[in-house]
Amino acid sequence: MSERAAPFYCPYCGDEDLRPSEEGHGAWECGACSRAFQLKFLGLLARGLRHADSGGDQT
Ligand SMILES: [Zn+2]
């Protein structure tokens, strides 16, 4: 499974002109609004979602 999460749209202007940034892992640059941002995986939700009570208990 890849650790890389590629955004499809810029979270700021919604444009699709995204390119990987040289700033580091998970960093992207938007060619439309010239913003640079970084995606970071924070972890799994401890409380899970409502339909998760069917037994996916992970610590
Ligand atoms: Zn943008």
Image (tube, grey):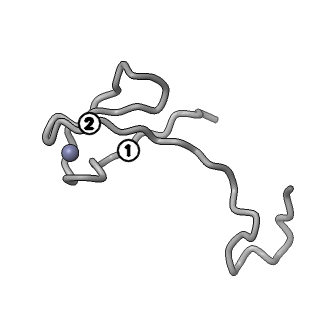
The numbered dot on residue 23 is: none
Up/down of 9 relative to 34, above or below = below
Q: Earlier in the sequence, mark 2 or mark 1?
A: 1
- Whole-percent x and y of residue 25? 49, 26
- Going by the numbered disc 2, the residue's amino acid type is Leu
- Whole-percent x and y of residue 37? 35, 39
**The N terminus is located in which quarter?**
top right
Which residue is under mark 1?
7
The numbered dot on residue 18 is: 2
- Going by the numbered disc 1, the residue's amino acid type is Pro
Left or right of residue 42: residue 54:
right
- Whole-percent x and y of residue 30? 23, 37
Residue shown at 39%/22% (left/top)?
23
Residue shown at 67%/50% (left/top)?
43
SS state under label 2: strand
Up/down of 51 relative to 25, above or below = below
Looking at the image, which is closer to me, 19 or 54?
Answer: 19
Residue shown at 70%/79% (left/top)?
51
Which image quadrant is residue 16 in? top left
Distance from Cα at disc 2 to Cα at disc 1? 8 Å
Left or right of residue 56: residue 41:
left
Looking at the image, which is closer to me, 55 or 31?
Answer: 31
Q: Are marks 2 and 1 in contact (CB under 8 Å)?
A: yes
Determine if the C-beta at disc 2 is less than 8 A from ligand 1.
Answer: yes
